[in-house]
Image (spheres, helix red, strand yellow):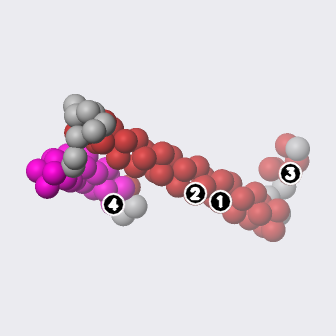
């Protein structure tokens, strides 16, 4: 196994590198999706959680949800953009 890494034959080394990059991209996407899911769920819990299940959603409540979601997601999006530069 050590010989495989010491003998950096371009083709096998590229295969390992490409596979590793693919695994990292999949992990990054899963982590991003999970984080977004948690941002949305926590927004719903924080805004609608204070009302009973029978409460009708008003325009005011919709605005509250959107404002909180925007306040949570914008820093996340900014961070993604800074990391992709």
* Residue 14, quarter of picture: bottom right
Specify the label residue 22 is tagged with. Answer: 1
Q: Can residue 28 be seen in this view?
A: no
Circles 2 and 3 in contact, beta carbons < 8 Å = no
Looking at this rendering, what residue extends furthest in the front direction? 54
Q: In which quarter of the image is residue 52?
A: top left
* Magenta-drawn stretch contains 69: yes
**Closer to the camera: disc 3 or disc 1?**
1
* Residue at left offset 22%, top offset 34%: 51
- Percent from the top left, x then y, of residue 61? 16, 47
Distance from Cα at disc 3 to Cα at disc 1 = 20 Å
Which of marks 4 and 2 precedes in the sequence?
A: 2
Foreground pick, 78 / 64: 64
Task: Specify the quadrant that holds the N terminus.
Answer: top right
Q: Which of marks 1 and 4 is nearer the N terminus?
A: 1
Q: Is the magenta stretch mostly helix, strand or loop?
A: helix
- Mark number, residue 81: 4
Q: Between label 3 and label 4, give the one nearer the viewer.
A: 4
Q: Earlier in the sequence, mark 2 or mark 3?
A: 3
Mark 3 highlights which residue?
4
Q: What stretch is highlighted in magenta?
A: 58-81
**Which residue, given by chain and number where applicable, does mark 2 sit on?**
25
Q: Find residue 78 and report its horizontal and vertical position in percent.
A: 27, 55
Callout 3–callout 1 Cβ contact below 8 Å: no
């Amino acid at each position: 196994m050590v010989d495989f890494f010491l003998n950096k034959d371009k083709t096998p080394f590229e295969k390992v590198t490409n596979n590793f990059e693919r695994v990292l991209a999949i992990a990054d996407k899963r982590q991003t999706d999970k984080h977004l899911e948690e941002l949305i769920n926590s927004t719903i819990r924080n805004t609608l959680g204070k009302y009973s299940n029978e409460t009708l959603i008003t325009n005011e409540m919709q605005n509250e949800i959107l404002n909180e979601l925007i306040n949570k997601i914008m820093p996340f999006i900014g961070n993604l953009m800074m990391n992709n530069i």
